Amino acid sequence: MKGYNIRTVVYYDNYYFDFYSKLKPAVQKKFDWTISLIEQFEKVPKKYFDHLTGSDGIWEIRVEYESNIYRVFTFFDKGKLIIAINGFQKKSQKTPTKEIKLAEKLKKMYFDETDK
C-alpha cells in the first residue's frame, strides 16, 4: 500500500503511543495497516474510520482483532491532517462517556496550543 498519501495522521502528545505500546504485536500491526489505509485511500470503509455520532468533529479509527474491539479517537486539523489522540479497548456496544469526554478535552487542548 505504499504510495501517495491523501491524508496524514499525526499523534498528539503521547496519548496514542501510550495506548499502542500496551497492545499485542498483532493488534499493533492491524492499527498500522488501518492508519495506512486511512492515509492512502479517499474512501475508507466505515468499518475502519467513521465519525463518532453526537460528537463535535471526533472520528474513530476502528480495529477488530479476534473477538476484541479497539478504538482510537481522532479529529481533523487543516483539511487532510488527522490528529490521533486517546485509544481504548471497547468492551460494550456503547462507547464509554469518559473516553468521549477525554477526546473532546484533548481536542480543545490541541487547538488551544496550536492557536498560540
Image (cartoon, rainbow, N blue to C red):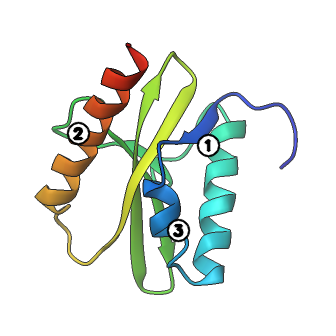
- Quote the CA–CA distance across marks 2 and 1: 21 Å
Q: Secondary structure at mark 3?
A: helix
> At x 72% / y 38%, what residue is drawn?
40
C-beta proximity under 8 Å, tags 2 and 1 = no
Residue 72 on image: x %, y %: 42, 56
Secondary structure under tag 2 reads helix
Which residue does the numbered mark 2 point to in the structure image? 104
Task: Give the amino acid type for the residue marked by disc 2 in the picture.
Answer: Glu
Residue marked by disc 1: 38
Q: Earlier in the sequence, mark 2 or mark 1?
A: 1
Task: Please indicate, yes or no, whether residue 63 appears anywhere in the rendered image.
Answer: no
Q: In screen coordinates, is 33 left or right of 75?
A: right
Q: CA distance from mark 2 to mark 3?
A: 20 Å
Locate residue 89, reporting x and y percent. 35, 73
Which residue is outermost to the right?
3
* Label 1 environment density (alpha carbons within 10 Å; few <14, some 14–19, many ≥20): many
From the image, state whether disc 2 or disc 1 is nearer to you. Answer: 2
Residue 90, percent across and down? 30, 72
Q: Where residue 20 is drawn, which disc sits there?
A: 3
Task: Look at the numbered discs 2 and 3 and tell me whether their residues touch, using CB distance below 8 Å.
Answer: no
**Residue depicted at 48% across the width and 37% down the height:** 83
Q: Residue type at mark 1: give it.
A: Ile
Type of amino acid under label 3: Tyr
Q: Secondary structure at mark 1?
A: helix
Tell which residue pokes out farthest to the front in this image.
116
Check contact, mark 1 vs mark 3: CB within 8 A.
no
Few, some or many residues within 10 Å of mark 3 (<14, 14–19, 20+): some
Residue 65 in the image: above or below residue 98: below
Name the mark on residue 60.
Answer: none
